[in-house]
Image: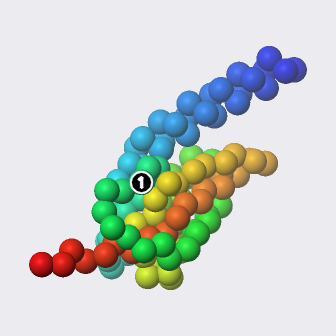
Amino acid sequence: MRKRFNRVTFLVIIIFTASSIILGVRPLSAEVKERVFITTSDINKDYKIKGIVVYRCGFFEIDKIKKGLAKEAKKLDANYVISVRFLVFGGEIYCYGTAVKTKKASK
């Protein structure tokens, strides 16, 4: 049983590592009027932290996760969700990250 659990855990880690690479920094669809970028790392811009965003959905629904995180970020007036992390529990994907608003560059 333990070997099977370890194999399943390994597969889940591989799948979500690949999906986190796919998520990278990408704009979302036109459903969100202003673009919200989602990344699993930090960004090289000055920003102000707006809060933590959390979203939950079923397996293999990456588009739904991106849209859900973006909607939650827009509620906080953020334009990036950084340091996004994934957790799988009970047949659901839990995803959370830090919502930030980039500061305008002064001229």
Q: Is residue 6 visible?
A: yes
Residue visible at 44% across and 71% down in the picture = 100
Residue lying at the far left of the rendered structure:
107
Rendered-image quadrant of the N terminus: top right
Q: Is residue 93 above or below residue 67?
A: above
The spot of residue 81 in percent (x, y) is 46, 64
Percent across and percent down for residue 11 are 63, 28
Residue that extends furthest to the front in the rendered view of this protein: 107
Please tell me whether mark 1 sits on a helix, a strand or a loop: loop
- The image shows residue 85, relative to residue 73, as above or below, that is above
Residue 96, given in percent of the width and then of the height, sits at 59, 59
Count the numbered circles shown: 1
Horizontal placement of 64 versus 56: left or right? left
Residue sitting farthest toward the top:
3
Q: Quadrant of residue 27?
A: bottom left
Residue of label 1: 42
* Quadrant placement of the C terminus: bottom left
Crowd rating for badge 1 (residues with CA inside 10 Å; few <14, some 14–19, many 20+): few
Can you see residue 70?
Answer: no
Closer to the camera, 46 or 101? 46
Q: Residue at x 31, y 56 (%)?
A: 44
Quarter of the image for residue 37 reads bottom left
Which residue is painted at 61% across and 33% down in the image?
13
Amino acid type, callout 1 = Asp
Q: Is residue 75 above or below residue 15?
A: below
Residue 37 in the figure: left or right of residue 14: left
In the rendered structure, the answer to whether residue 95 lies left or right of residue 28 reads: right
Residue 63 percent location from the top left of the image: 47, 56
What sort of colour scheme is used for the picture?
A: rainbow
Residue at (48%, 72%) from the top-left corner? 49
